[in-house]
Image (cartoon, rainbow, N blue to C red):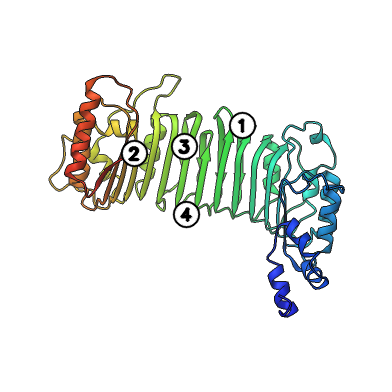
Amino acid sequence: MDALPDAILQCILSRITNARDVSSCNCVSKRWKDSTPYVRTLYFPRSSFDSPSSSEGADNVIKRMVSRVVKLEELIVYCPFSPDGLASWLSLVGHSLLQLELRMDNLSDNQGSHESPSKLDYVGLANNLESLKLWGVLMVRTPNWDVFPNLKNLEIIGARFEDHVLCAVLHTCPVLTRLLLLGCEGVRSLSIELPCLEQCKLDFYGMGNSSLTLISPKIESLEVQGCSWIRVPETKHLRKLSVSNTAGRVYMVDFGNLSALEFLCMRGIQWCWDAICKMLKLASEVKHLFMKVEFTGDYDALQPFPEIDFVDFFNSHQKLQKFDIHGAMFAALCQKNSLKHVDSGFVIPFLEEVVITVRSPLNAEQKMSTLESLLKYGKSLRSMVIKILEMKSCHSSADDFFDEICRFRYMNHSIVRIE
């Protein structure tokens, strides 16, 4: 290392990110110490100041280290810090920071939420950010932020919001292309209007009865968890869509044109049948369909899926290449009338992979007939995986059904496997 030119040494040391390692480099030699100010990222792990020998507070140490950096572009702080400490660092490097990640740890701090200025307010000092990631945030008061003119990525993990506060935060980020809200609670009715948004992942924690309206004409990927009412009118560029609700019901989905959709995932305990039918009808061009909805029914009563015609379903989804089908949906395709009207020219042209989860031995004959039909009409089928969950039946029919599946697998061992 001593033989390297200064520029090469600076280039190598600038790749070091952990604050403890950067501090150690300062002790090696004066030449190394003179090179560490050229680091571009500083990362302070959760345990950075757990050592009993750490006599100086985190705020002061972080301030001293960031003040020595010529042009800090990324700052990641997981260790505890104070609002004043954050203000002191960002006043020094806020103009150069492009990426900021903070573990706020104030979800249960109701008193801190009324502080002014708060930690959230001081985040606004870094107004040239391109990416902002916050962990454990209490947002019950609108932060004092101006517009972030360059912010393209916003991630908030583990947060409690008021609806109007979240809307105000999003209004300060007019050029967002990626939005991620994970494990967030308190959202009841959210309206998002971001013209540049391309990727969006929303995970709302609680009763599962939130409503969402998203107006983003460039949206390409959307994942929503915990909403009962969803409206996304502009979807001509949407290629990936996932809608799930593990705590409540999905009552209504309203999407625009889904002609570009390639992947659709539908999950949840209960969906209204109208919502399921509308979603499947809109996704007629989909290539990968994942369905794990356990029940239907418009109200509290959980009801099984009605019969779905096998031929009509695949004729309506001609481009389907991969199909993950679980429990209720598979049972609906296996009704006794589902295969009565098969035209001699019927084929499933592009289906290559099928993953089927079987939960019950009921209607075993129809289920075996459906499995055989998938092989018979799926001219491009390369793989069929049958997953058998623990069947809640002590009757011998469960054993007989399993024997039939094993026989089916043996006869088609090049395609079929059991998990």
**Three-letter amino acid code at disc 4?**
His
Q: Earlier in the sequence, mark 4 or mark 3?
A: 4
Q: How far is mark 1 from mark 2, CA to CA?
A: 31 Å
Quarter where residue 69 is shown? bottom right
For label 4, the residue is 237
Q: Residues within 10 Å of mark 3 (few under 14, many from 20)?
A: some
**Along the line of sight, which residue is nearer the eye, 168 or 183?**
183
**Three-letter amino acid code at disc 3?**
Val
* Disc marking residue 188: 1
Residue 79: x percent and y percent? 75, 46
Q: Earlier in the sequence, mark 1 or mark 3?
A: 1
The kind of secondary structure element at disc 2 is strand
**Three-letter amino acid code at disc 2?**
Ile
* Disc marking residue 253: 3
For label 2, the residue is 325
Q: Is residue 249 left or right of residue 385?
A: right
Q: Residue at x 80, y 53 (%)?
A: 125
Quarter where residue 144 is shown? top right
**Nearer mark to the viewer, of 4 and 2:** 2
Q: Is residue 192 left or right of residue 243?
A: right
Q: Earlier in the sequence, mark 3 or mark 2?
A: 3
Q: Residues within 10 Å of mark 1 (few under 14, many from 20)?
A: some
Q: Earlier in the sequence, mark 1 or mark 4?
A: 1
Q: How far is mark 4 from mark 3, CA to CA?
A: 18 Å
Q: Residues within 10 Å of mark 2 (few under 14, many from 20)?
A: many
Q: Is residue 282 left or right of residue 38?
A: left
User: In the rendered image, is residue 373 in sight?
Assistant: no
Q: How far is mark 1 from mark 4, CA to CA?
A: 27 Å
- For the N terminus, which image quadrant? bottom right
The kind of secondary structure element at disc 4 is loop
106 versus 58 height, above or below: above
**Three-letter amino acid code at disc 1?**
Arg
